Image (cartoon, helix red, strand yellow):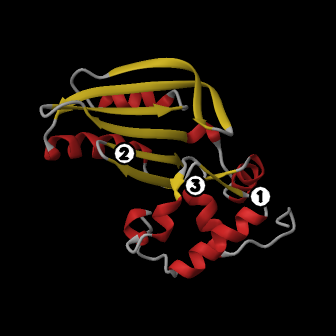
């Protein structure tokens, strides 16, 4: 059983980090292009066999749960992830891009550090909206009592949106952890700035 005294393998840490803040479809782990789908960094070298073996082992230990075709951390797994990665929720942020129609998209960031309000205002982005929000649900295991939400509507132009996204990410650089998952019209990036 994984406990305080257990030495976790690199594969254990990888799985914990991949699914800590969002559910991952189990099919992504068994897909031929699992490295690209899971957005694994180039320096991570893991075979699909080792990856699946680790997921199954963590399931048996009740660290990972599989529900409705998705893998997620159990409460026990989430507590383990927080400990292993020394998570500081005061530095949490969530960046989302959503295509609204052919002409515009919405870029949104949810964050805990009030100091980022000034940083985002200093970027002079048109139509920037920032407001406090109570009770933000990160996942099934974590809810934050107070966050800030900033959003801006930008032309659905890759270069312009990339520039805005880059400006927003720059103050949020030095990820302690970052997770990216792409669906049809939405990209989400979670992380912790140092």
In the displayed structure, does residue 145 sit left or right of residue 160? right
Q: CA distance from mark 3 to mark 1?
A: 14 Å
Quarter where residue 187 is shown: top left
Query: SS for tag 1?
Result: loop
In the displayed structure, does residue 152 sit left or right of residue 34? left
Q: Which mark is residue 94?
A: none
Residue 158 pos. (x, y %): 16, 46
Residue 14 pos. (x, y %): 59, 67
| Res 121 visible | no
Residue wearing tag 3: 19
Q: Earlier in the sequence, mark 3 or mark 2?
A: 3
- The residue depicted at 64 percent of the width and 38 percent of the height is 140
Residue most extreme to the front: 68
How many neighbours does mark 3 have within 10 angstroms: few (below 14), some (14-19), or many (20 or more)?
many
Which of the two marks, 3 or 2, is nearer to us in this view? Answer: 3
Residue 166 pos. (x, y %): 29, 46
Mark 2 and mark 1 in contact (Cβ < 8 Å)? Answer: no
Which of the two marks, 1 or 2, is nearer to us in this view? Answer: 1
Residue wearing tag 1: 62
How many neighbours does mark 1 have within 10 angstroms: few (below 14), some (14-19), or many (20 or more)?
some
How many neighbours does mark 2 have within 10 angstroms: few (below 14), some (14-19), or many (20 or more)?
some
Residue wearing tag 2: 169
Q: Earlier in the sequence, mark 1 or mark 2?
A: 1
């Amino acid at each position: 059983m994984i406990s305080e005294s257990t030495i976790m393998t690199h594969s254990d840490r990888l799985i914990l980090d991949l699914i800590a803040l969002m559910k991952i479809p189990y099919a992504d782990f068994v897909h031929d292009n699992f490295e690209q789908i899971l957005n694994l960094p180039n320096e991570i070298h893991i075979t699909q066999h080792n990856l699946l073996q680790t997921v199954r082992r963590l399931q048996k230990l009740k660290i990972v749960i599989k529900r409705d075709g998705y893998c997620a951390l159990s409460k026990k797994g989430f507590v383990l992830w927080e400990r292993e990665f020394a998570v500081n929720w005061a530095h949490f942020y969530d960046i989302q891009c959503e295509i609204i129609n052919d002409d515009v998209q919405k870029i949104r960031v949810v964050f805990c550090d009030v100091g980022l309000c000034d940083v985002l205002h200093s970027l002079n982005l048109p139509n920037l909206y920032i407001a406090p929000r109570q009770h933000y649900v990160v996942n099934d295991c974590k809810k934050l009592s107070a966050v800030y939400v900033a959003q801006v509507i930008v032309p659905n132009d890759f270069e312009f949106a990339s520039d805005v996204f880059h400006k927003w990410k720059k103050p949020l650089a030095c990820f302690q952890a970052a997770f990216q998952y792409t669906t049809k019209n939405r990209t989400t990036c979670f992380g912790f700035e140092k």
